[in-house]
Amino acid sequence: MSEKYALVTGASRGIGKAIALKLAAELNYNILLNYASNDEAAKETQDLINAENVSCDLLKFDVSNTEETTASLDKWLQDNPEAKIEVIVNNAGITRDGLFMWMKPNDWHSVINTSLNGFYNVTQPILKDMLTSRFGRIINVVSISGLKGNAGQVNYSAAKGAVIAATKALAQEIGKRNVTVNAVAPGYIKSDMTADFDEKELKKEIPLNRFGEAEEVAELVTFLASRKASYITGEVININGGLYS
């Protein structure tokens, strides 16, 4: 069995789950599946990935916690010395929506910590090995909110906007080592995060007149993780049905 792995954060459900499954099925990657709390969902996703004839290891840690993340990744790498993590998909993110004027400090910090600090906590420890190997794919799942802003999501927009800027800067730092860094910016995608949205009203604003599917985001991420995307780096690719460009 191949020792090539893709690490996907926040991958027990939704977009992360779809990405992990597609990377396993189409690119034959073993999967490191990170999740924060839902053991049952993570185990179900693990079983689906194992059915693709690759291995799937569960890594339970909160990406916003530097010590916890570092300890979990270090232990796994020590236990799997032959393994190469070729792909990182920074997908973990949370929302704590509300008007900025009333926003509590925890609602600000928890959203920033998960998306932005999570990107640092997960990517930085693995990067050296990618640079040594002269191959890697870093793909950050951001949001339309980080590009155009969204009322009631100043914290989320700030977090995702910062990851977009980090994507562009890191791409310039490490391109010479054949490690690409790109971001994918979904619009309205059917998931737990959009379950309470008024789909009937919102889809009127979308030229394609529907919400996207998690599998459609996974297709784009899988393309960026593949050899077909070797000359694409520093890009933010919208996937929003024409809502914003």
Image (cartoon, grey):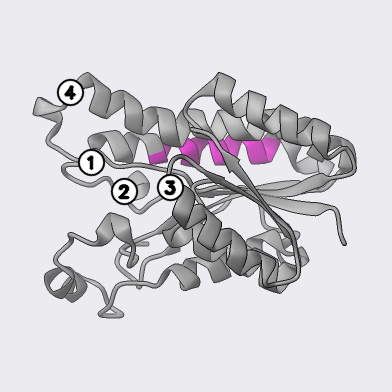
Q: Earlier in the sequence, mark 3 or mark 4?
A: 3
Look at the numbered disc 1 and give the secondary structure of its residue.
loop
| Mark 2 and mark 4 residues within 8 Å of each other at the beta carbon | no
Neighbor class of circle 3 (other Cα within 10 Å; few <14, some 14-19, many 20+) is few
Residue 217: tell me if it is visible.
yes
Which kind of residue does numbered mark 2 sit on? Ser
Q: Quadrant of residue 226?
A: bottom right
Q: Which mark is residue 153?
A: 1
Which kind of residue does numbered mark 3 sit on? Asn
Q: Which region of the structure is painted magenta?
A: 160-172
Q: How many marks?
A: 4
Neighbor class of circle 4 (other Cα within 10 Å; few <14, some 14-19, many 20+) is few
Instruction: Measure the C-alpha gap from mark 3 to mark 1.
Output: 25 Å
Which kind of residue does numbered mark 1 sit on? Gln
| Mark 2 and mark 1 residues within 8 Å of each other at the beta carbon | yes
Return the residue at label 4: 104
Q: Earlier in the sequence, mark 4 or mark 1?
A: 4
Q: Nearer the viewer, residue 106 or 154?
A: 106
Q: Earlier in the sequence, mark 3 or mark 1?
A: 3
Instruction: Measure the C-alpha gap from mark 3 to mark 4.
Output: 26 Å
Quarter placement of the N terminus: bottom right
